[in-house]
Image: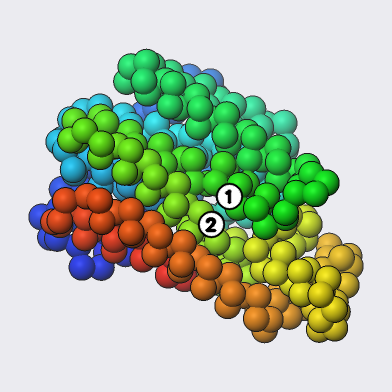
């Protein structure tokens, strides 16, 4: 498990210790939740889990649960539920995006092929659905709505904006469905399953929606800036597949306004990027373009909006930890 509260500065020591202890339990139960006698699924289902990960979503469940009783057993199941759902979506996303690596290891479809990767994702979704049933009908309802949003987000990203639809609004809506929906579920479930005071679950849901968009905008920056040796991701993967990101949308808008430098960059974006050297050149161009800093600033403003929502929570170490958690997600370098 690579998750650590050492990545979240200034967190109350007692709270950090409690969350870390519960994260260990989450990790153990996460592995138990995918155990199977099927020889193939035994390995494919653990492929990305064994590769590690930040465990951002389980940590948010636990931080939200600290506003109630974090030590309720259902809280652990809620944390496992959101991480299982996230892992399942990664198997599908890597096929859709033709990503060659994930978390520093070969993507599942690179090892076993697209069909096995997709079916493994389905297997994990099935296990997550079974787990939600143990948490009650409200958890089942919330999980199914989130699953629906994950699917719609991927669908809308694949199809692109409709005629007359603003591409920026479309892109943010995709981020909200593909990323923020699961963080919203994490915050909401953590509050509900811990018996937090009335209304806290709605605050955490709204916070998750906002911080999820900020998190993905920061990921757009990382997709261009990251070192593959530390991030486990190849810079510019989205560019190669023609997947829109906020930096490329900003460049295209400037090109449409007649910016010659942006027009040149758009031409490069639309060229054949199957060659690693060609992709590297475009990544370098985008790193030097103002769109990268504009995206970073937008991520920061969105994070500020998320922190503003947290002001509705009672003062104390949990709120401060959530604020630090927000900053860490947006300012991370891997």
Task: Say left or right for 200 vs 90.
Answer: left
Query: Which residue shows up at 36% across the image and 20% down it?
Result: 138
Query: Which residue shows up at 63% across the image and 40% down it?
Result: 153
Q: Is residue 264 visible?
A: yes
| The quadrant where residue 58 appears | top left
Q: Horizontal and vertical percent for residue 272?
A: 89, 65
Q: Horizontal and vertical percent for residue 264?
A: 86, 79
Task: Say left or right for 250 vs 1.
Answer: right
Closer-to-camera residue (325/230): 325
Per the image, the residue denoted by label 2 is 216
Per the image, the residue denoted by label 1 is 175
Q: Horizontal and vertical percent for residue 2?
A: 37, 55
Q: Horizontal and vertical percent for residue 90?
A: 57, 43
Task: Say left or right for 49 vs 267.
Answer: left
Query: Which residue shows up at 74% across the image and 72% down it?
Result: 251
State if disc 2 and disc 1 touch (CB < 8 Å).
yes
Which residue of the protein is positioned furthest toward the front in this rendering?
164
* SS for callout 2: helix
* SS for callout 1: helix
Query: Which residue shows up at 75% across the image and 43% down it?
Result: 158
Q: Is residue 26 visible?
A: no
Q: Which mark is residue 281?
A: none
Q: CA distance from mark 1 to mark 2?
A: 7 Å
Q: Residues within 10 Å of mark 1 (few under 14, many from 20)?
A: many
**For marks 1 and 2 on the same chain, the one whose residue lies earlier in the sequence:** 1
């Amino acid at each position: 498990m690579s998750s650590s509260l050492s990545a979240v500065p200034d967190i109350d020591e007692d709270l950090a210790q409690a969350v870390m202890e519960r994260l260990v339990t989450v990790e153990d139960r996460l592995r138990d939740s995918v155990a199977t006698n099927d020889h193939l699924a035994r390995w494919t289902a653990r492929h990305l889990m064994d590769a590690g990960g930040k465990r951002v979503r389980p940590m948010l469940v636990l931080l939200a649960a600290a506003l109630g009783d974090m030590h309720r057993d259902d809280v652990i199941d809620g944390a496992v539920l959101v991480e299982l759902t996230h892992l399942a979506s990664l198997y599908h996303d890597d096929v859709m995006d033709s990503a060659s690596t994930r978390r520093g290891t070969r993507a599942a479809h690179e090892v076993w092929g697209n069909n096995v990767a997709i079916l493994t994702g389905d297997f994990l979704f099935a296990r997550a659905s079974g787990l939600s049933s143990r948490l009650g009908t409200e958890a089942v309802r919330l999980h199914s709505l989130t699953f629906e949003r994950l699917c719609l987000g991927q669908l809308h990203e694949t199809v692109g904006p409709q005629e007359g639809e603003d591409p920026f609004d479309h892109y943010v809506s995709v981020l909200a469905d593909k990323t923020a929906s699961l963080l919203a579920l994490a915050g909401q479930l953590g509050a509900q399953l811990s018996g937090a005071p009335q209304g806290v679950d709605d605050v955490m849901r709204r916070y998750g929606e906002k911080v999820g968009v900020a998190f993905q905008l920061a990921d757009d920056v990382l997709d261009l800036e990251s070192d593959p040796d530390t991030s486990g991701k190849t810079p510019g993967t989205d560019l190669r597949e023609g997947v829109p990101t906020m930096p490329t949308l900003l460049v295209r808008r400037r090109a449409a306004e007649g910016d010659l430098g942006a027009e040149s960059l758009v031409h490069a974006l639309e060229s054949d990027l199957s060659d690693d050297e060609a992709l590297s050149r475009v990544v370098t161009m985008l790193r030097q373009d103002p769109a990268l800093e504009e995206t970073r600033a937008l991520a920061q403003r969105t994070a500020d909006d998320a922190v503003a929502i947290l002001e509705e929570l009672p003062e104390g170490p949990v709120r401060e930890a959530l604020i630090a958690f927000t900053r860490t997600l947006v300012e991370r370098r891997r």
